Image: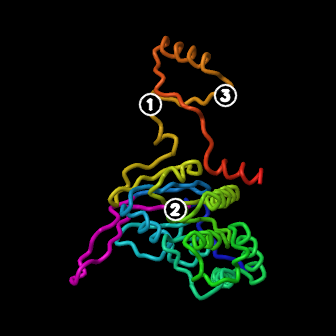
Amino acid sequence: MPSLPHTTPGAPALELSDLASCYRIGLLQRKREVLHGVNLILQRGRCLGLVGPNGSGKSTLLQVLAGVQRSERGVVRVLGSDPRQARARARLAYLPEDSPFPAELSALAALDLLGALAGLPRKEVRSRAERLLERVGLADQRLAPLRTFSRGMMRRFGLAQAFLSEPEVVLLDEPTAGLDAPGFAVLEDLVSEAQGRGASLVLASHLPSDLLQHCDDLAVLVDGHLRAHGPTDDLLAIEGRVQVELEGMGPAPLKELGTWVREVGGRVRSTSPSGRSLLELYGQAERHA
């Protein structure tokens, strides 16, 4: 494998300082600011959940980090380098929301092309491509043109391309959009595997519940402003409230426990059976098939 340019040793995975980004509107091409002075640092090996409503600037922020859009002002660094430079682009992968892949190519040919553009040897690209298409459930469609793929299939293909080069930084924009529960399980596996090898990730979504179990940190973006940023547990914690999950207790012991909680000054807010996730239900069904 050809040697890749080195990035700055010890530099954070991502570093934004006073980042602003604009787009032009109308006949006069007036500027409209989308991101307003964003300051953010993501240390290496951590996973950031970038959350916010639609139109909050999440996609624009990822485009700037990926080097496909220029910032209006501020400093942007990926592994210590400008993301538009080869040394940074060789170490990161980006899955945009709209899946802009060559529709006339087959899934396998498209991955071959993308791997070649990333500088990977042909044999290594083909081996990784075959393996990833199998993992995302597209092995049987590997020779079919991408134009024949459904939205969910295109999203699975997008995940394959994002992890093809085993990047050090992975930027995923709305990665769960169009995925069914098995597809979400594939995404979880790929994210967990990348975390296991020390990659840094940004998972952007307007549905934060999709992301929380993987995210070390959260950044809340609203109207282009970074409104909150920090460790996930710290941001989501409610002072004075804890959640306890119990097993093997019937109604009578639970009633006694509730009485004791009230006696010591606490309050039981609600009780309900602990349920399984849809992914767990799918897994059980597959094991019994």
Residue 92 visible? The answer is no
- Residue lying furthest front: 289
Is 112 in front, or is 64?
A: 112
Q: Is residue 122 left or right of residue 87?
A: right
Magenta: predominant secondary structure element? strand
Q: Which quarter of the figure has residue 109?
A: bottom right
Badge 3: how crowded within 10 Å, few (<14), some, or many (20+)?
A: few
**Disc sitting over residue 210 in the figure:** none
Q: Are marks 2 and 1 in contact (CB under 8 Å)?
A: no
**Residue span colored magenta:** 13-38
Q: Are marks 3 and 2 in contact (CB under 8 Å)?
A: no
Q: Is residue 23 left or right of residue 105?
A: left
As shown in the figure, which amino acid type bears the numbered disc 2?
A: Leu
Badge 2: how crowded within 10 Å, few (<14), some, or many (20+)?
A: many
Element carrying mark 1: loop
**Disc sitting over residue 247 in the figure:** 3
Badge 1: how crowded within 10 Å, few (<14), some, or many (20+)?
A: few
Alpha carbon separation for disc pair 2 and 1: 30 Å
Whether residue 28 appears in magenta in the rendering, the answer is: yes
Is 131 in front, or is 2?
A: 131
As shown in the figure, which amino acid type bears the numbered disc 1?
A: Glu
Element carrying mark 2: strand
